Amino acid sequence: MTSLHRRDFLVAAASLAAGSLLATPSVARAAEALAAPTLRAQRLAWAGVRLQLGKDNLFLDPLINPDVWGTALKDSFIPVDVTDGARYVLITHRHPDHFDPLAARRIVGDTGIVVCTPDNAAAVAAAGFKVRTASLYEPVLLNDFTATAVPASDGYGDPQVSWIVTAGGRRIIHCGDTLWHGAWWHIGRQFGPFDAAFLPINGARFAWRKPVSDVPAVLTPEQAVAAAQVMGARLIVPIHYGVTGAEGYSEMPHPEADLLAAARKRTQDIEIVRPGDWLTWKPRT
């Protein structure tokens, strides 16, 4: 081989090697994305949501006790039994339609832990559970889930939070049964955007406490859309609606239709997910 040919050969070989080195990271990322577990979300009854990443499961406000609402709740109760992987239960507040000891026991057994804020720790411990507390804005690592409690506002004035959960390269927020409050902007600036916001929409009024205010104690559909827009939520998945005929408790007559109408006005994506159905996100590359 002449010196000229030898030089051309070496230059070509070096170029090929450089190209291979440059391509390796993107190829590796694609391979990692294909191998990475995909985040899935299953809607449960009422306000409950199950997040699944690989074999691990994280439940937010799971409800299986039919005595809580009796015949007033029309949702199907979805089984919460898990046999493999890690299991976690997070609660937004201690009201029985959001902290159901029957569901929590079925999920975590006798040795598992329920995650809540310090304000609710005594009530959860009194129900016989080990408690892991999470203060506002302090992330809690739960295997490949990261959960962070952020402000919410309860219709009774009882302690309540919303939960931000990050997993599989996705971020969701679950808002229990909060009403409108002023922390939406702060949540959006600090943690948004969100791939999905699980938001209550029934605008419920209650007559259990006197004198009666006749003011919605839960987000209305219009307020849910406004909250999603302020926080930067790409998608709303409505929760916490479907009760009719409960004494002293009345929700808006057409929350789902009103939500869709409000979303059209503000170009907000909505996904109506029935109890038992799943959402699936692809891993980010």
Image: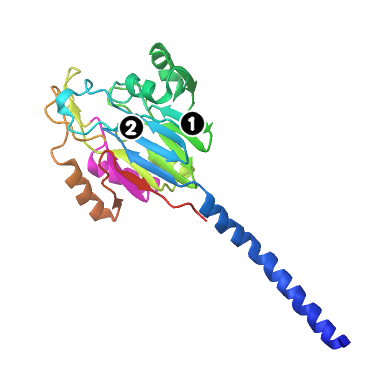
Residue sitting farthest toward the top? 126
The three-letter code of the residue at mark 2 reads Gly
Q: Nearer the viewer, mark 1 or mark 2?
A: 1
- What residue is shown with label 1? 86
In the image, 141: left or right of 126? right
Label 1 vs label 2: CA separation?
23 Å
- What residue is shown with label 2? 176
Residue sitting farthest toward the right? 3
- Please name whichever residue, 74 or 173, is drawn nearer the observer in this view of the structure: 74
Residue 3 percent coordinates (x, y) = 88, 86
Residue 122 percent coordinates (x, y) = 42, 13
Task: Magenta stretch: give its range.
Answer: 217-239
Residue 61 percent coordinates (x, y) = 35, 29
Q: 260 above or below 250?
A: below
Q: What residue is drawn where x is 25% and y is 42%? A: 274
In the image, 260: left or right of 279? left
Q: Is residue 74 visible?
A: yes
- Please name whichever residue, 57 or 85, is drawn nearer the observer in this view of the structure: 85
- Please name whichever residue, 195 or 75, is drawn nearer the observer in this view of the structure: 75
